[in-house]
Image (cartoon, rainbow, N blue to C red):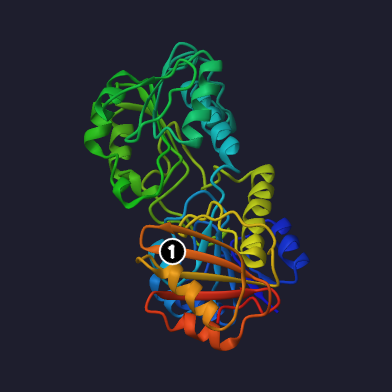
């Protein structure tokens, strides 16, 4: 029986989907460190995580039975994607499922900060009736600057315009502006004109240290700042100084460079206790709707890969959309992408009298993926011959032979 390890409170629907497909599931609430994860993955073929668990090259190297990793979130920077590909481990994520939840949190925080609701709320809890309009503004007519115009940035752009805001954005890639949003050609230009600046970039290493003292200094005095993307893109000390000097009127931060492993753990940050600063524990996508959608989406991707070999939307392997096998046996062969592999696979199968009913090849950088359907069971000697190819990374045979990697 295949085994799955799901960490960090993955939604119960994911457990149901995998269990319904004959997979034994071990579900745990918190993240694991490297040594703990290596131990827990012995005899496990499927791993499900969220943002805390780090799947390093050492973890992957020490887990030869691991077939697929599901990131039940948007980001995959916590996974060594190159190592996973080189070891034939497919990685799937949920690039769209929690977009709306993150956008709604951003909108709520923009309004809360511009109305200084944090300070009014605290005053009343302290027994002080502080009824005043000082420092409170409508968002209508303000300029929202979005850094990173991907799935979240674009949807935020549309909703912000519906609130009467003007939207500008900056992205290093060519992106189509939605509605009346205006693309700016530099980050500096965006910082100069924006009343509110919000970051929605991905977790690629090049985004580390994106926002620091120099960037805060270029923002309008009295503007508002949000980071709901990655903790390492921003210098928290620089934000603290900008708040204390009142150059920045308010901020909302949902992600941090170092985050506790599980609910209830102690949290500390130089941003605690600052005026008009909203700190949330990485809950941008933590709504019941988003978590259910993510659980369903990623679990089905893992299930489909196990059952049919399909890699659609895999973030590290060549993408092939595959239906149920057209023959008796399907051979899924991951290999290094060099010329002649498809011919070599075909020739080896022919040498052993194997008739091919269907065959597909896709490549992605250094990795190739050949999927072959045959009209009969494949001899073990043929599979061993495929494994002997210099380009070999991994073979899975499905069905009727077991789903584990050979």
Give the vertical position of 106 relative to 256 (above or below).
Answer: above
Residue 166 placement (x, y as % from top left): 44, 15
Query: Considering depth in this image, is 129 or 342 the residue closer to the camera?
Result: 342
The answer to whether any part of residue 118 appears in the image is no
How crowded pointer 1 is (Cα within 10 Å; few <14, some 14-19, many 20+) is rated as many
Residue 274, x across and y down, in percent:
40, 37
- Above or below residue 28? Residue 162 is above
| Residue 331 visible in the current orientation | yes
Asked if 109 appears above or below 392 in the picture, the reply is: above
Asked which secondary structure carries label 1, the reply is strand
Looking at the image, which residue sits at the far bottom?
381
Give me the residue at 32% from left, 52% from top: 205
Q: Is residue 165 left or right of 222 when viewed as pictured? A: right
Q: Residue at x 58, y 55 (%)?
A: 72
Q: Which residue is mark 1?
A: 368
Q: Residue furthest top?
A: 141
In-front residue for pair 114/61 = 61
Task: Between residue 383 and residue 9, name the one nearer to us.
Answer: 383
Residue 310: where, in percent of width, then height? Answer: 60, 59
User: Can you say which quadrant of the picture contains the C terminus?
Assistant: bottom right
Quadrant containing the N terminus is bottom right
């Amino acid at each position: 029986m295949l085994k799955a390890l799901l960490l960090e409170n993955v939604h119960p629907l994911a457990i149901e989907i995998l269990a319904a497909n004959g997979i034994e599931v071990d579900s745990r609430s918190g993240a694991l460190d490297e040594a703990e994860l290596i131990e827990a993955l012995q005899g496990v073929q499927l791993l499900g995580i969220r943002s805390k668990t780090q799947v390093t090259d050492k973890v992957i190297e020490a887990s030869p039975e691991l077939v697929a990793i599901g990131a039940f979130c948007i980001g995959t920077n916590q996974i060594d994607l190159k190592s996973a590909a080189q070891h034939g481990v497919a990685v799937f994520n949920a690039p769209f499922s929690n977009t709306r939840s993150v956008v709604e949190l951003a909108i709520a925080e923009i309004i809360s900060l511009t109305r200084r609701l944090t300070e009014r709320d605290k005053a009343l809890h302290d027994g002080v009736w502080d009824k005043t309009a000082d420092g409170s503004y409508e968002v209508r007519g303000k300029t929202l600057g979005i850094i990173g115009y991907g799935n979240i940035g674009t949807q935020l752009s549309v909703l912000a315009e519906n609130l009467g805001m003007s939207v500008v954005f900056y992205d290093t890639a060519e992106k189509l502006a939605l509605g009346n949003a205006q693309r700016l050609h530099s980050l500096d230009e965006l910082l100069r004109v924006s009343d509110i600046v919000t970051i929605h970039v991905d977790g690629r290493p090049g985004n580390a240290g994106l926002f620091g003292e120099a960037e805060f200094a270029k923002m309008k005095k009295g503007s508002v700042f949000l980071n709901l993307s990655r903790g390492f893109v921003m210098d928290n000390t620089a934000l603290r100084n900008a708040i204390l000097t009142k150059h920045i009127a308010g901020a909302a931060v949902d992600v941090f460079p170092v985050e506790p492993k599980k609910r209830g753990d102690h949290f500390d940050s130089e941003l605690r206790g600052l005026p008009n600063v909203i700190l949330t524990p990485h809950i941008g996508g933590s709504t019941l709707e988003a978590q259910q959608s993510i659980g369903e989406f990623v679990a089905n991707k893992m299930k489909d890969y196990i059952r049919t070999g399909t890699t659609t939307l895999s973030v590290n392997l060549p993408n092939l959309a595959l239906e149920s096998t057209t023959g008796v046996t399907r051979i899924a062969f991951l290999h290094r992408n060099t010329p002649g592999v498809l011919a070599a696979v075909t020739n080896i199968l022919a040498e052993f009298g194997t008739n091919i009913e269907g065959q597909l090849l896709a490549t992605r950088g250094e990795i190739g993926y050949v999927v072959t359907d045959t009209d009969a069971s494949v001899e073990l000697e043929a599979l061993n011959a495929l494994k002997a190819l210099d380009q070999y990374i991994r073979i899975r045979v499905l069905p009727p032979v077991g789903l584990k990697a050979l």
